[in-house]
Image (cartoon, rainbow, N blue to C red):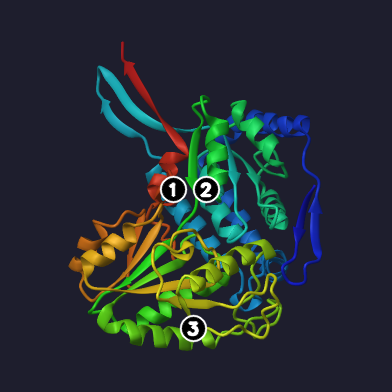
Amino acid sequence: MITCISPIDGSVYATRETLSAEDAREAVDRAQSAQSAWAARPLDERIRLVMAGVKNVGDMNDEIVPELAHQMGRPIRYGGEFGGFNERATYKAEIAHDALADIEIEDSDAFRRVIKRVPHGVVLVVAPWNYPYMTAINTVAPALIAGNTVILKHASQTPLVGERMAEAFHAAGIPEDVFQIVFLDHQTTSDLIAAKSFGFVNFTGSVGGGQAIERAAAGTFTGVGLELGGKDPGYVCDDADIDAAVDTLIDGAMYNSGQCCCGIERIYVAEQHFDSFVAKAVEVVSGYKLGNPLDPETTLGPMAHKRFADTVRAQIADAVADGATAHIATFAEDDGGAYLSPQILTNVTHDMRVMREESFGPVVGIMPVRDDADAIALMNDSDFGLTASVWTQDVKRAEAIADRIETGTVFMNRADYLDPGLCWTGCKDTGRGGGLSIIGYHNLTRPKSYHLKKV
């Protein structure tokens, strides 16, 4: 049984029974049987149906927003995820013809030589709870458009999300066997992967979860895309717009209660701006309103589960015990459970857990740096490599710094945004593969060569 405990009040919000091994196998069989007919449909038809499903999700938004608050705690004032959900799906639809186009080498009187992109077959998408709609659509939309069938396994914290997407897509005309939502336990998921049930598996979640996916896929030659942990840094150069840097980096650290894949978890500031930056950051965070996410005045909701908040509290406590300075007083609404006060730490070092381990919560450590070389060394001193944010007036300087940073994406003067035209990828313990952009389509298909000799 999968149980969603609402972070609002600790009550059981939803329960779903997991599929038996036999029923899970039957779901895969249906997806495999439906795939060839789906892939045979014209590309424009698949695009139209997917985008009709996306529109249906948008039509449900008034119901979805409070559901998300109940499931994972995001305040309703932020209006849900449909903006990004629609932006990403729309871009993938717009580039589909070019991304999936044949590569023609020769078409002469003697030969036709061409490389086509063909679907893997059945794609398993294992989606997380923190941005449950946007992270899912990153793979669901292009996988379906490319001619794959899709099985979506959503996080136990957000079980209603997959059901909403299935309802929307089926109402648009996408056959039920082409897009399925399933509830599976970890062992059944691993067993299906090990049995070569899927042509491709996309997983977004923890490092441990990604390792389990890789172990299950070992020896099967199943394609795997993994977006795992992060400890994303921001670097404020000596020529940066300090006010803009504070506003964006602190929002990137605290938005969604810090529960963002590419949230800012470490900030390095040119030493001459350090005191000013910290003072402005403390002022911003002190103005947050922690509370019930169903209250339109709330700007910071609870973390999705008490155990996540406990991890952050432990990191903060350890850092303070080791000499860090905590700048934010405990909020009155902090209940010692899922409702957690935001925190800014200084006098931190990379010997502290809070600067090395993923926090995934509303805390950020800030350190002064001497120069670019010092900042680059600290940014790279991490097991993770998803994004980094560089703040400077000089584009050439930013790009030179970016060339030396070990991440999948580098931002200049912005943070915490997935550009659908760019590849979303990571390195080191953040994972492997790439989504969005034309590369996302390439990962969800395989090249197939045709060497046709004409008689």
Residue at point 38%, 52% (across, down): 423
Q: Secondary structure at mark 3?
A: loop
* Residue 50 seen from this side: yes
The amino acid type found where label 2 is placed reads Val
Residue at point 35%, 55% (across, down): 407
According to the picture, the residue beneath numbered tag 2 turns out to be 207
* Residue 414 seen from this side: no
Q: CA distance from mark 2 to mark 3?
A: 30 Å
Based on the displayed image, in which of its 4 quarters is residue 443 positioned? top left
The amino acid type found where label 1 is placed reads Asp
Q: Residue furthest left?
A: 396
Q: Residue furthest top?
A: 455
Q: Position of residue 155 (x, y in %)?
A: 66, 52
Q: Position of residue 240 (x, y in %)?
A: 27, 79
Residue at point 36%, 63% (across, down): 388
Give the side of residue 217 with respect to residue 29, left or right.
left
- For the residue pair 326 and 276, the one nearer the viewer reads as 326
Q: CA distance from mark 3 to mark 1?
A: 30 Å
Q: Secondary structure at mark 2?
A: helix
Give the side of residue 106 with respect to residue 348, left or right.
left
The amino acid type found where label 3 is placed reads His
The answer to whether residue 183 is above or below residue 251 is above
Q: CA distance from mark 1 to mark 2?
A: 7 Å
Q: Position of residue 427 (x, y in %)?
A: 38, 48
According to the picture, the residue beneath numbered tag 1 turns out to be 429
- For the residue pair 320 and 166, the one nearer the viewer reads as 320
Q: Are marks 1 and 2 in contact (CB under 8 Å)?
A: yes
According to the picture, the residue beneath numbered tag 3 turns out to be 327
The answer to whether residue 436 is above or below residue 73 is above
Q: Earlier in the sequence, mark 2 or mark 3?
A: 2
Residue at point 56%, 48% (across, down): 140
